[in-house]
């Protein structure tokens, strides 16, 4: 029997986050960014024959995605400062 867990998270820079966490994916994990949605979404699917493996992989993934989100946020802010578009990514009420 196969057990599958799916984690769906929203990010300002989904491609950046997906790329950062995919580097640590095990072979039973698949991560992709969906930029075509109103909010940027990263979807990760974890499949195994053991529930413990799925839970442990999800736990590790959640720790990794937290770090990836912070790094990608800083990358966006740095890029904005270089182009003069500061604070857009920190203020959810700012329209682009």
Image: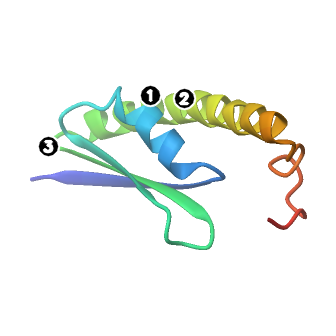
- 94 or 65: nearer the eye? 94
**Is label 2 in a helix, a strand or a loop?**
helix
Using the rendered view, name the quadrant where residue 87 is placed.
Answer: top right
Label 2 close to label 1 by CB (< 8 Å): yes
Task: Looking at this view, name the residue that lies furthest to the front.
Answer: 83
Q: Which residue is mark 1?
A: 60
Q: In the rendering, at what x and y percent does residue 80 appear?
A: 79, 41
Q: Which mark is residue 8?
A: none
Q: Residue at the spot x=18%, y=34% of the render?
A: 27
For the residue carrying disc 1, how many other residues have a C-alpha within 10 Å: few (<14), some (14-19), or many (20+)?
few
- 12 or 61: nearer the eye? 12
Label 3 close to label 1 by CB (< 8 Å): no
For the residue carrying disc 2, how many other residues have a C-alpha within 10 Å: few (<14), some (14-19), or many (20+)?
few
Q: Which residue is mark 3?
A: 49
Q: Which residue is mark 2?
A: 63
For the residue carrying disc 3, how many other residues have a C-alpha within 10 Å: few (<14), some (14-19), or many (20+)?
few
Task: Looking at this view, name the residue that lies furthest to the left.
Answer: 1
Q: In the rendering, at what x and y percent does residue 77 appear?
A: 78, 36
Q: In the rendering, at what x and y percent does residue 34 appear?
A: 45, 62
| Colouring method of the image | rainbow
């Amino acid at each position: 029997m196969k057990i599958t867990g799916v984690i769906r998270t929203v990010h300002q820079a989904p491609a950046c986050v997906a790329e950062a966490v995919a580097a640590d994916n095990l072979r039973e994990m698949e991560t992709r960014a969906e930029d075509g949605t109103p909010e940027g979404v990263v979807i990760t699917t974890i499949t195994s024959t053991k529930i413990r493996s799925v839970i442990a992989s999800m736990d590790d993934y959640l720790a990794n995605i937290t770090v990836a989100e912070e790094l990608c946020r800083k990358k966006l802010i740095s890029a904005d400062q270089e182009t003069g578009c500061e604070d857009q990514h920190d203020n959810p009420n700012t329209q682009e």
